[in-house]
Amino acid sequence: MLIERLQNFLSDGWIAHHRGKILLASLISLVIISPALDVDQRGITFAILSSIVFVAGQLSLCVHPRVVLIGLILGSPYIAAVWVWNFTGHYQGVHETQLLSGAAFYGYIAVVLLRVMFRERHVTGDNLFGAAAAYMLVAAAWGFLYALVEYSLGAEAFAANQSVQDPDLFYFSIVTLTTLGYGDITPVAPIARALAAIEAMVGVMFIAVIVSRLVGMHTARLQIDE
C-alpha cells in the first residue's frame, strides 16, 4: 500500500527526527509572512504557505497509515478550497469548506502531536518543537472557527474599531489562547463568546499539562541515567 510505503520511508532518517521543527517553521512562516503582505499578494502567498503547512503536517502524521489517511481526508478539502478560493473567487460554499476543514485538519494534527509526545519516554528537541507547533495549531484551528462564525453572522459576531477580516481573527485567537486579551477585538455573539471562553481555558490547561509532562519525562530520564 502506498501510504504504508510512505510511512516506512519517513520513519527513518533526518525527516523522522525533525518533523516538529519542520512543522513549526512552516507555521511561523504562515503566521508572519502572509499577513504582512499587500492584499494583492496575500492570497497566493497564503495558498503556497498553507500547502507547505499541509505537507509538513502530513509528515508529522507518519506514525501509522490510518493516521496519515485521516489527515489526507481532512486536509485535502482544505487545500483544495484555499486554491479554488484564490483563483476563482467567492463561490458559494468554498470559503465555508476552507474554514471548517481547516479547523478539523489543524486540530487533528495538534491532537496527534500531543498523543505522540505523551507516548514518548524521553524528552527530545523535536518533542519541544512539536509541542510548540501543537500550540500554534490549536490557535489556528480556533482562528478558523472564529472566521466561520464571523462569515456566518457578519458584523454581529465581533466588535472592533474596524471591519474584522480573517487574519484579524487568527490574531484574536492567539491573544485569547495566551490569555493576553488586548480588547481591540471583542466577541459579541453568544457562539463567539463561548468559543473564546473555551479557548482561554484550553490555553491555560495546555501549558500546565505540557509543562508537567515534559518535566516528568525529564525526571524519568535522570532517574534512568543514575
Image: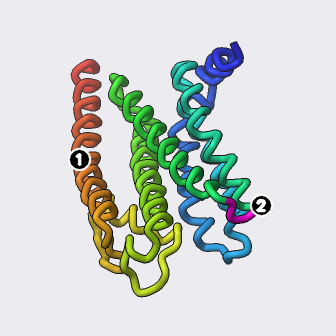
Which residue is drawn at the image coordinates 40% and 49% (left, top)? 138
Amino acid type of disc 2?
Phe
Does the segment drawn in magenta span residue 90?
A: yes
Could you say where residue 50 lies in the image, as x and y percent from the top left? Answer: 63, 52
Residue at image point 64% right, 39% down:
76
Q: Position of residue 92 (x, y in %)?
A: 64, 59
Quadrant containing the N terminus is: top right
Range drawn in magenta: 87-91
x then y, percent, for residue 34: 62, 66
- Looking at the image, which is closer to me, 52 or 21? 52
- Return the x and y of residue 44 as percentages of the image width and height: 73, 62
Query: Which sits in the foreground, 38 or 127?
Result: 38
Instruction: Please report whichever mark, 1 or 2, sits nearer to the chain's N-terminal start.
Output: 2
Q: What residue sits right under mark 1 in the picture? A: 205
Image quadrant in which the C terminus is located: top left
Which element carries disc 2, helix, strand or loop?
helix
> Image point 62% across, 31% down: which residue?
15
Other residues around mark 1 within 10 Å, as few (<14) / some (14–19) / many (≥20): few
**Placement of 25 over or under 121, stated as above or below:** below
Residue indicated by mark 2: 87
Q: Is 43 on the left or on the right of 116, as rendered?
A: right
Q: Residue furthest right?
A: 87
**Count of numbered badges drawn on the protein:** 2
Report the side of 166 relative to 121 (left or right).
right
What secondary structure is the magenta-colored segment mainly?
Answer: loop
